[in-house]
Image (tube, helix red, strand yellow):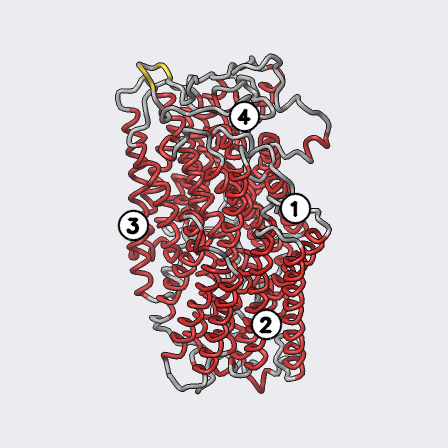
Amino acid sequence: MSARGIWRCWAALMLLLALTTALAFVPLGSAQLGASLAIACVKALLVLFFFMELKGSNPLIRAFACAGFFWLLIMIALTSADYTHRTDQRVPVDEPG
Amino acid sequence: MTDEVLTFQYADAAQQRDAVTLGMWAFLATEVLFFGTLIAAYFNYRIWFGPEFIAAARMTKVLFGTINTGVLLTSSACMAMAVSGYEAGSRRAPVLWLIATALLGLAFIGIKGVEYWLEYQEHLVPALSFDLPRYGGVAEIFFLFYFCATGLHALHLLIGISLVIWLAIWIGTGRIDRESSTTRLIGLYWHFVDVVWIFLFPLIYLAGRSG
Amino acid sequence: MSAPAAESYLSARIGIRSWLLTTDHKRIALLYFASITFFFAVGGVAATLIRLNLIVPEGLLGSPDLYNRLFTMHGVIMVWFFLIPSIPTTMGNFIIPLMIGARDLAFPRLNLLSWYLYIAGGVITVTALLLGGVDTGWTFYEPYSTFYATGYIILTIFGIFVAGFSSILTGLNFIVTIHKLRAPGMTWYRLPVFVWSTYATSLILVLATPVLAMTLLMLLAERVLHVGIFSPQLGGDPLLFQHMFWFYSHPAVYIMILPSMGVISEIVPVFARKPLFGYEFVVWCSIAIAAIGFLVWGHHMFVAGQSLYASLAFSFLSYLVAVPSAIKVFNWTATLHEGWIRFDAPMLYAFGFIGLFTIGGLTGLFLAALPIDVHVTDTYFVVAHFHYIMVGGAVMGYFAGLHYWWPKITGRYYPEYWARFAAILAFFGFNVTFFPQFILGYLGMPRRYQAYPPEFQIWHVLSSAGASILAVGYALPLFYFTWSILKGDRAPANPWEATGLEWTIRSPPPPENFDRTPTVVRPPYQYDRGKPCLQVGND
């Protein structure tokens, strides 16, 4: 990839970094996590596609690049399906016994 | 991974190049799940512990974290420059870019070290200096996650820095074959360590800042 | 195809260094054979002592603590140091490059490193277990493994952690090899099913093992630093450990069974002299099992306190994974239909596999059903179920493959009648050992107890008697295989008249496998009125 392309990508990453840091101090409530993760995903995709050259790679390499993230998503989705629906109460941790 | 020309099990250089590239990506897929397990634990505890967990995240040093993210992203750009210079056939440029990459990596470690030191003095390090009555048990779990995640990331980065320095020396002294995939593979590893940090950054430093 | 000198990979170089520093996939496979046999024996001794203890209601060995350490040792050794590496690292290592027409795996040095990591992990774990052992069970559940821990947990876990990297590297090596080193003409649909199922296994190894590594690392951190992550006493959630542990350990069951299914898919067509029925279904079912196998782990936690909604989802998904497994059983059975069936030893083991796996799979459905699972959780019903899968399935498949490829690996025949006798003995002994445990479990005998009420004794005695038959069945091959290496008749290149590429080269194979790269012209398992149509073309 060309030097120009690399530094353009870098500039985009820096802008996104500034954006996500600034957004963190804006009261967005429950949208906060979603917004910061969405920006993180865009940054990661920039690195994966341009720096790691997934853009010019064959489908097999792309499939393996996706596989890890996809399986991680499965783990997060199914474990959090449990945690968001737990009915039992958590024992307060600060008082021993 | 391999620094020599065609080994006997391959029919031609293209096949070898494809194979080592696929091997590297398969390895990175395992790394995604390795770090991902920690991140999944983080998400579930964030749901389970709720506000207490997020409040603990506010005690991290957002300025250090942001600067470090910038440093690491810049190092990745340098690494990309080194790889593209190497593939274009030049010898001097990639060495210089690799040195820049390694220096930025060391800068990241240095900043991280200062951060750890400050946290030690603020009694935020579990098992070493944690002030349990003041911060509470949930904060301790958050900081254990924080030290595990950033510590393992730093370990990966240290391995990356060693590889980059070794590579700079080998390219500089002309001991590496023109057809070799080594530069590209080390580049992939370096960028991956960067991707891990891209996700750790908002989870650790940006949680609960506006609350 | 035939080279002038009968040089083989065994005789090409001699001396201990030529073995310990070899990068030849065939020699590494033999290193694995030797070490895996050792660990199988260690795990077997622990199993024998367990069954010995349970002959009398009050426990023959007396101490409950010793009993806890015994079943932990049995589980840890059998799961991580026998079952998971068993078929992929031995027959996979040896046969996969031969089947696809390659000269070696993609990364031969990495392959050797895998073996050293496996040995290092094994030595560390066995040391820990011999120094005094661990009493948590192989699952290391919280808070047994942290708050109430008494044994050498740190060392044991570290050993498993190291062996995990061996698994990852092995899986990675197979994935790249199967993608990139296939001979010309060896398209995906011409691959033998064993290659497909090893590929599916490798995907699980690569995607699940790092989760175990990180989980164990968190456990180590908690144990060493005494800071809560999972332990409820320290504020953590023990269920999180179970989630993470089973995210690896349930797919790990498929790591054990998929390679066996691959072996059976090789053997059934050869000894029925017919193409495998529904080849595409069988291969895609392997991939489906690998994928769906990741979505079912919650059925280990139905009564552990996870949310009911999660349990319902996991129950449904667990039913789903039974579908591809059942399709495979039907395909093997349909392959037998109107075949010229030969009852050689590998085929007898394969029959054993199909029957026992079917029982194990069907009782798995009982356990996927929420209400029945509540009744039988942590009873001998579960013990019987997973032994039918892992011993009746995976180990039968291991022995089936070992007998099937033995002439290729060593260039010698084994005594056929002894082998058939051992196969039948193992099948018989297995059922006597484990079928009574279904009944025991259904009557309410909990697992992992060293003493029990006297009314259960009859079933326990039956089970222990069966175990001694099973032990003979497993020990017999050790003797006749040794005899075979020393005195067995020489085997030709293709003793079973099979169709795969591995049968076109000499037995034992030459060091570089193929004199020149073969060209593949047809799918596997093609027979013309009982005569094999080799996959390799004569160009």
Question: Is any part of residue B108 visible from this angle?
Answer: yes
- B45, A49: nearer the viewer: A49
Q: Check disc 3 and report its element: helix, strand or loop.
A: helix
1 and 3 marks on the same chain:
yes
Under mark 1, the amino acid is Ala
Of badges 4 and 1, the one in the foreground is 1
Numbered disc 4: what chain?
Answer: C
Under mark 2, the amino acid is Val
- Image position, residue C407 (x, y; %): 52, 20
Q: Check disc 1 and report its element: helix, strand or loop.
A: helix
Which badge, 1 or 3, is on the more N-terminal residue?
A: 1
Q: Is residue C187 above or below residue B41?
A: above
Q: Which mark is residue C476?
A: 4
- C406, B93: nearer the viewer: B93
The residue beneath circle 2 is B71
- Image position, residue B172 (x, y; %): 71, 53
Under mark 4, the amino acid is Leu
Of badges 1 and 3, the one in the foreground is 1
Under mark 3, the amino acid is Tyr
- The span from disc 2 to disc 1 (Cα, nearest Å) is 38 Å
Of badges 4 and 3, the one in the foreground is 3
Q: Which mark is residue C389?
A: none
Residue at 33% x, 61% y is: C311
Of badges 2 and 1, the one in the foreground is 2
- B86 sits left or right of B29 in the view: right
The residue beneath circle 3 is C319
Question: Is any part of residue B53 visible from this angle?
Answer: no
2 and 4 marks on the same chain:
no
Which badge, 4 or 1, is on the more N-terminal residue?
A: 1
- The span from disc 4 to disc 3 (Cα, nearest Å) is 38 Å
- The span from disc 3 to disc 2 (Cα, nearest Å) is 49 Å
Of badges 3 and 2, the one in the foreground is 2
